Amino acid sequence: MLRGKSKKIFAFLLALAILASVLLLSSCKLKLPNLPTTGSESEEGKLATPKNVSFNDNTNEVSWQGVENATGYLLWVNGNTYEIGAVDLSKKIVLLEGINEFKVKAIGDEEFADSNWSQTVTYTMTVQAEESLYNKVNIKVAETAKDNGYDYGYELIRVVGISSARLEANRFGENICFEVVAQKSGKLYNLQVRYGWDDAETVQEMIENIDKAAPIKTYINKVATYNAKNAVTQLDKHDKNKLNEDGSYKSAESLLKSGSYDGKMQELKNHGYQITVLDSVVREGYENGSEFAFNIVGTYKATKAGADDVYFSSIMRVDILNPSRNEVANYTTFLEYEQYRNVTEKKYVLHEKGTTLDYILDWEQKSVEEQVPSTN
């Protein structure tokens, strides 16, 4: 009997203790810290510090993880600071040779103060100066795309070469024209992007100060690519070797296999130089009466034993005299035989100092003797 009463008393006391604990907890105001969902831990009233700051050497982009409530970001690169929008979590940068440093901070508002700077990230650039310069030009072309009229979905792929460079002012003023390959909706385009300067004394000065250039004009051309619907036969192994991985044509390589053609590139061949293609793009062709016409834009390297290497860009106009229904043959095979085509050199830009984008002189401002290296 006593044992039963003890159980009842114990149960009553346990229930009373639980009720007291619930009342005590409900009377307390428990306040949890406002932890950010991204970024490092923040100080009270200050945004979290951006984390995961990194550099991608394939895209030349600095990126970081977003911070909650940030209205934007400040990116510090080698002493220069760039203001970035709240939705942008990366930026292409121009690298310097040697050690490059960058860090990021989040920008606040009236409610939250700016964050601390992230840890400084370093990247060592070990490529040669001319490659760094090419990278600089490439980034500049991409960054000014929106100001130049081709911001409707075009994505820059690479700079192929330079088709003109003028120190004497014409209707564009002092200017330089870059040949660019871009893509949009899975299709390739060749864009001619022209930039201008004020009071530039040399073309080298133009290129080295490309970040100060003002965009002038952009022309858009479709790139010729293989379209199976327009081909009358399946591609065999021979034809496949005439295409790049992206489906564009190796027209420049086919042209170099042919006999001769008029122009400065031919004069280099006549002086014993071997010509190789560094980069090229072919503009989509069109019917020209009974002929088929298109342009090859390329940058080339000419080599000869005992002589300095020569680099140059050119635009070659090609007219196929009796075009075939086989588009691969029109863009490639027929170029190898003089009787099937006419070739006219529309542009020739000599690259001095042995680089593809270092010191460029417009061939129209120089005599043939000055452009073609001596055979002595």
Image: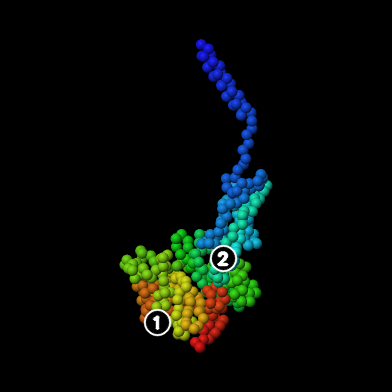
Q: Where 374 sits versus 109, above or below?
A: below
- Category of crowding for the residue at label 2, using alpha-carbon neighbours closer than 10 angstroms: few (below 14), some (14–19), many (at least 20): some
Kind of residue at disc 2 = Met
- Sequence-wise, the earlier of marks 2 and 1 is 2
State the residue lying farthest toward the bottom: 376
Looking at the rendered structure, which numbered label has been put on residue 359? none
Q: Position of residue 192 (x, y in %)?
A: 52, 69
CA distance separating discs 2 and 1: 43 Å
Q: Disc 1 on helix, strand or loop?
A: loop
Depth check, mark 2 against mark 1: the one in front is 2
Q: Residue at x 43, y 81 (%)?
A: 261
Q: Disc 2 on helix, strand or loop?
A: strand
Q: Position of residue 168 (x, y in %)?
A: 61, 78
In this view of the protein, which residue sits in the foreground, 126 or 300?
Answer: 126
State the residue lying farthest toward the top: 1
Q: Where 315 sits versus 96, above or below?
A: below
Q: Residue at x 37, y 81 (%)?
A: 339
Q: Is residue 17 left or right of residue 272?
A: right
Q: Where 121 sits versus 17, above or below?
A: below
Q: Quadrant of residue 96?
A: bottom right
Q: Position of residue 312 (x, y in %)?
A: 51, 77
Q: In this figure, which residue is indicated by the disc labeled 1? A: 259
Q: Is residue 46 left or right of residue 322?
A: right
Q: Quadrant of residue 149?
A: bottom right
Q: Where 264 sits versus 45, above or below?
A: below
Q: In this figure, which residue is indicated by the disc labeled 2? A: 125
Q: Is residue 246 left or right of residue 59?
A: left
- Category of crowding for the residue at label 1, using alpha-carbon neighbours closer than 10 angstroms: few (below 14), some (14–19), many (at least 20): few
Q: Position of residue 86 (x, y in %)?
A: 59, 52
Q: Is residue 369 visible?
A: yes
Q: Residue at x 49, y 67 (%)?
A: 181
Kind of residue at disc 1 = Gly
